[in-house]
Amino acid sequence: MKVIAVGMNYATHNKEMRHSLELSEPTIFMKSDSSLLKDGKPFFIPDFSSEIHYETELVVRIDRLGKNIAERFAHRYYNEVTVGIDFTARDLQSRLRQQGLPWEISKAFDNSAVTGTFIPLDEAGGINRIPFHLDINGTKVQEGNTADMLFPVDKIIAYVSRFFTLKIGDLIYTGTPAGVGPVRINDHLEGYIGERKLLDFHVK
């Protein structure tokens, strides 16, 4: 099982992170299988970072084997979605980027890919107009809509499948909108698609 993630897929987030690249194709990175955290289990802040940021994202689960998938057929390869958190060790990421080094350790560390309960796509709405948001301690801190993606889900699937065979159970984290920020011990995170809560866990 692979965890595939898309970076810089919302213009508002790129602006807040001061990214000025003109992107002609999706920016892809991977998380390890040990990155996955599910079933409402708590997230423990690791000792190697003092600045862990949440990034709320729509997550798509692949349900069919595919390679070199044409964009017009990509919708056949998934039928379930949820909301997830791409945790980022921002201090590590910033330091490694400044040094021109790979920054996988800031993104792919254990338990850094939190996933909620998957629901059928037809219960979430059309893939290109799904609203989602994150509450921390009862306050909405981040919200987005797949309508605002720079690269929609089907284009992401077509692009990724050129390089990686997609297998049943693979997850695609589709990018985060503006509003990312730090988490702290005892924070309570709740993620929603529309008004339906699919993600609920605590930070320890």
Image (spheres, grey):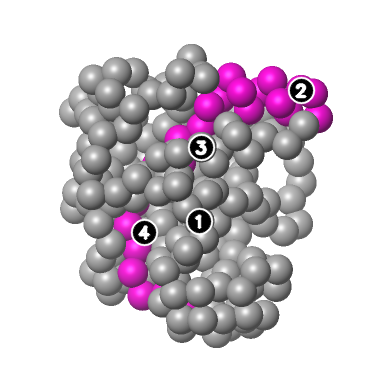
On residue 48, the disc is none
The disc labelled 4 sits on which kind of residue?
Ile
- For image coordinates 73% across by 36% down, the residue present is 102
Answer yes or no: is residue 52 visible.
yes
- The percent position of residue 67, horizontal first and vertical second, equals 63, 80
Q: Tell which circle, 3 or 4, labels the residue nearer the N-terminal end.
A: 3
Q: Mark 4 to mark 1: distance in Å?
A: 21 Å
Q: Amino acid at mark 1?
A: Val
Classify 10 Å Cα crowding around label 2: few (below 14), some (14-19), many (20 and above). Answer: few
Q: Is residue 31 left or right of residue 116?
A: right
Residue 48, given in percent of the width and then of the height, sits at 52, 20
- Asked whether residue 15 is drawn in magenta, I would say no
Is 142 positioned to the left or the right of 92 in the image? left
Q: Which residue is mark 1?
A: 3
Task: Report the residue marked by disc 2.
Answer: 98
Q: Which residue is mark 3?
A: 109
Q: Position of residue 84 (x, y in %)?
A: 37, 47
Q: Nearer the viewer, mark 4 or mark 1?
A: 1
Q: Amino acid at mark 3?
A: Phe
Q: Which mark is residue 130?
A: 4
Which mark is in front, 3 or 1? 3
- Residue range (magenta): 77-100
Badge 1: few (under 14), some or many (20 or more) residues near its Cα, within 10 Å?
A: many
Say whether marks 4 and 2 touch (CB < 8 Å). no
Name the residue type under label 2. Gln
For marks 3 and 2, the one nearer the N-term is: 2
For label 3, count other residues whose C-alpha is less than 10 Å away and answer few (under 14), some (14-19) or many (20+): some
Q: In 3D space, how far apart are the residues under numbered discs 3 and 4 (Cα atoms)?
A: 28 Å
